[in-house]
């Protein structure tokens, strides 16, 4: 006997079958590895489980230059992702390359979001010069100051409550470094002194705390008296080397090891290393009590370097994304923002204020201890020459790093820095 298909049977009975909604498949690219990668994969799986009408197919690519090079070349020919993670410091470069599409008010509405939901500094970093939004901020990740409480015991810099205290300027910070050295610290201050990111973030923080600018909004390198302030920042970092307070030419992994092994009293690094300390403490593998705080006001202004991960929708070559897929992408972005408490466990501050101001985030320690930096952080210059994997990072490792190790005077380093960045902007 011949079997009827469901369609034939429906026609025979004079009925009509309802159209089946097509599942929207979203191609996703990110650059998250390690603990960040594990957390993001868990969030994507949770989203897929909760939203059977959307399927996110995620690919993780190599962080930095490889990621941004692939995005540029792939998006231009319509072979890129539908949505991607994007450092907001790279947004000026993305606009110059013409690979980012605007995020409209209708997009935000589809995501269940509004611009008022985000911290002002992160939102500004997600916009182009004309105020058009090109990304949705996801987090704020900044430099913070980790400290070894054991190496500060008996000094004026550890309060009775076990928290860092008494550091209100450069002199008192350097006094704490010397006190830690007297307490047996062999490298009182650790950071990646031979690494582009480590050197750049400390330098940029010291410059910003003086009110200096690396690149102005109109494209001037070290405008006004910023060259003198840049030289002062390099001079300070050089002194830390000469006094034996910081390691010579330490790469990233070595800088982490100096702190986790108990040799350093202080550690400048991103808040993304908070999970490392939490995990080691939980396993009783750290060997000392630790704390974390905002970087103190060393040079007059309370601020420090920051960047944000955001969500961006690249061009699709010469084609346009369908309205249905774009709506699905925005639904995904909105879901991620509202679930960013899970991401905050990686040390980040949620850029989405309803989560950042929630009781749940307030209870997340030590992350909420430095949450105030979200209102005070200084983002990278809004220039194609700045941001992750940019000429500013190259200049940090090729010019500033040698200078802080005594290979050239600060003023000469600043001259080279200015020339290098001006060349990069032509």
Image (tube, rainbow, N blue to C red):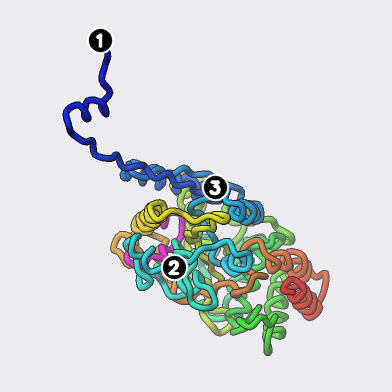
Between marks 3 and 1, how big is the CA–CA gap? 57 Å
Residue topped by disc 3:
33
* Label whose residue precedes the other's in the sequence (3 or 2): 3
Q: Is residue 273 above or below residue 306?
A: above
Q: Which mark is residue 23?
A: none
Q: Would you call the spot at circle 1 few (<14 residues within 10 Å), some (14-19), or many (20 or more)?
A: few
Foreground mark, 1 or 2, reads 1
Q: Which residues are magenta?
A: 341-354
For numbered disc 1, what is the local secondary structure?
loop
Q: Is residue 351 above or below residue 277?
A: below
Is residue 351 one of those drawn in magenta? Answer: yes
> Residue 364, position in %: x, y?
36, 59
Between marks 1 and 2, how big is the CA–CA gap? 74 Å
> Residue 256, position in %: x, y?
60, 54
Between marks 3 and 2, how big is the CA–CA gap? 24 Å
* Label whose residue precedes the other's in the sequence (3 or 1): 1
On the rendered image, what quadrant is the C terminus found in?
Answer: bottom right
> Residue 280, position in %: x, y?
49, 48
């Amino acid at each position: 006997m011949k079997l009827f298909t469901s369609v034939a049977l429906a026609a025979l009975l004079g009925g009509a079958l309802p159209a089946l909604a097509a599942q929207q498949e979203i191609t996703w690219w990110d650059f998250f590895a390690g603990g960040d990668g594990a957390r993001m994969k868990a969030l994507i799986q949770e989203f897929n489980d909760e939203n059977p009408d959307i399927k996110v197919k995620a690919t993780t690519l190599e962080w930095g230059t490889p990621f941004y090079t692939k995005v540029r070349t792939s998006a231009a020919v319509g072979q890129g992702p539908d949505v991607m993670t994007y450092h907001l410091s790279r947004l000026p470069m993305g606009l110059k390359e013409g690979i980012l599409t605007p995020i409209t008010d209708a997009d935000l509405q589809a995501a269940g979001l509004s611009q008022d939901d985000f911290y002002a500094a992160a939102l500004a970093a997600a916009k182009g010069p004309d105020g058009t939004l090109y990304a949705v901020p996801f987090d704020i990740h900044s430099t913070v100051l980790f400290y070894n409480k054991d190496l500060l015991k008996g000094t004026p810099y550890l309060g009775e409550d076990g928290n860092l205290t008494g550091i209100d300027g450069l002199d008192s910070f350097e006094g704490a470094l010397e006190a830690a050295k007297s307490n047996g610290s062999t490298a009182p201050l650790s950071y990646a002194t031979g690494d582009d990111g480590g050197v750049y973030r400390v330098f940029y923080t010291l410059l910003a705390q003086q009110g200096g600018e690396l690149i102005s909004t109109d494209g001037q390198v070290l405008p006004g008296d910023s060259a003198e302030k840049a030289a002062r920042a390099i001079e300070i970092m050089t002194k830390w080397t000469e006094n034996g307070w910081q390691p010579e030419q330490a790469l990233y992994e070595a800088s982490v090891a100096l702190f986790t092994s108990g040799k350093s009293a202080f550690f400048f690094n991103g808040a993304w290393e908070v999970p490392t300390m939490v995990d080691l403490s939980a396993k009783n593998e750290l060997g000392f009590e630790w704390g974390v705080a905002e970087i103190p006001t060393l040079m007059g202004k309370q601020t420090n370097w920051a960047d944000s991960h955001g969500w961006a929708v690249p061009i699709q070559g010469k084609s346009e994304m369908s309205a249905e897929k774009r709506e699905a992408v925005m639904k995904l972005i909105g879901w991620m923002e509202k679930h960013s408490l899970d991401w905050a466990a990686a040390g980040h501050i949620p850029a989405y204020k309803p989560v950042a101001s929630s009781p749940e985030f307030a209870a997340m320690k030590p992350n909420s201890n430095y949450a105030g930096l979200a209102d005070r952080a200084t983002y990278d210059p809004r220039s194609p020459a700045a941001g992750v994997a940019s000429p500013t990072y190259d200049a940090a490792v090729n010019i500033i790093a040698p200078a802080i190790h005594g290979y050239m005077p600060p003023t000469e380093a600043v001259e080279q820095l200015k020339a290098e960045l001006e060349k990069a902007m032509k």
